[in-house]
Amino acid sequence: MKTLRRWSGVIKRRVLGLCEIKAGILLSRPVGAAAAEACPESDAVPEIKSTREYREGLPWSEPEFLRRTSAGNVLYELFVEGQPVCYGWVAEAGARVGVLHDLHLVVPERGFYVWDCATSPAFRGKGYFLALLTGINHGAYPSATLALVAVDTGNGASRRVLARAGFRPMFSYVSARLAKRPLFNLALRDGRLVAAQREFDRLEHLA
Ligand SMILES: CC(C)(COP(=O)(O)OP(=O)(O)OC[C@H]1O[C@@H](n2cnc3c(N)ncnc32)[C@H](O)[C@@H]1OP(=O)(O)O)[C@@H](O)C(=O)NCCC(=O)NCCS
């Protein structure tokens, strides 16, 4: 009996270990002259630049940096006194972006999609991520009308900053895989459960 219980415990752990369930929220905000902007709280004057050439010390290998840039992504960095402290990648119009597991979207013609952002741990809580988002939303894409971003449901720090930067939820989604194979992908929009990929596909024609 003990052996049976032990084995059923092992099998349960293995099966659960093969199962991955993740949830996120797709947010958007209008961009352009009419959009109200939040102000960063930091005293230091940050400088935001797009980094088009690879340099030593970036958090990615050169092949990975080139893979991203050649797929329609641009790296934005925020510098304080010449030191890079915060970054975010932006997928430009027409880029195809993997969001979560097999879920993906194509960036709309007059839009951009912000992804893979981080602030160096020693510089967190000083408003730099908000400043980076504000800088990108303001001036980086003058003809864009829509900014998109996806965030893990459990990432409270990021969700707070995104809300302060004017991003509002469009829909929530959940994706489950078993042994790397899709089990289900669902989105919750306006209180209705729908196929998640269909919601991501609709974004391409929004802006
Ligand atoms: C999310 C992240 C980019 C925020 O960067 P940041 O420069 O600290 O952001 P801001 O200073 O503009 O805002 C910080 C907010 O996060 C909270 N926070 C999270 N971690 C913090 C820390 N270690 N120190 C201080 N504040 C922290 C603050 O409370 C603040 O919210 P509040 O102003 O409502 O109190 C940063 O925490 C990070 O790099 N996280 C790991 C990677 C990640 O989650 N990326 C986001 C993917 S979309």
Image (tube, rainbow, N blue to C red):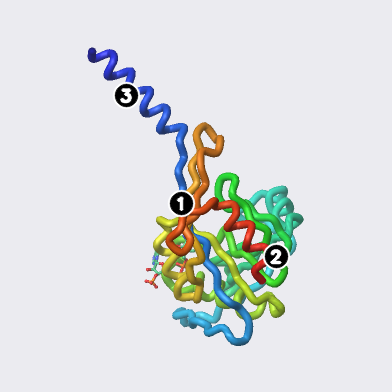
Residue sitting farthest toward the front: 192
Q: Amino acid at mark 3?
A: Gly
Give how far across and how far down residue 78 sits, in percent: 58, 71
First-in-chain label (3 vs 1):
3
Where residue 205 sits, quadrant-wise, is bottom right
Q: Secondary structure at mark 2?
A: loop
Q: Is residue 89 visible?
A: yes
Q: Amino acid at mark 1?
A: Ala
Mark 1 neighbour density, 10 Å: few (under 14) some (14–19) many (20 or more): some
Q: What is the quadrant of the C terminus in the image?
A: bottom right
Give how far across and how far down residue 55 sits, in percent: 70, 58
Q: Residue at x 45, y 61 (%)?
A: 121
Q: Nearer the viewer, residue 75 or 197?
A: 197
Q: Secondary structure at mark 1?
A: strand
> Alpha-carbon distance for marks 3 and 1?
26 Å
Report the number of discs: 3
| Residue, disc 3 | 9
Q: Amino acid at mark 2?
A: Glu
| Residue, disc 1 | 23
Q: Residue at x 46, y 47 (%)?
A: 22
| Residue, disc 2 | 92
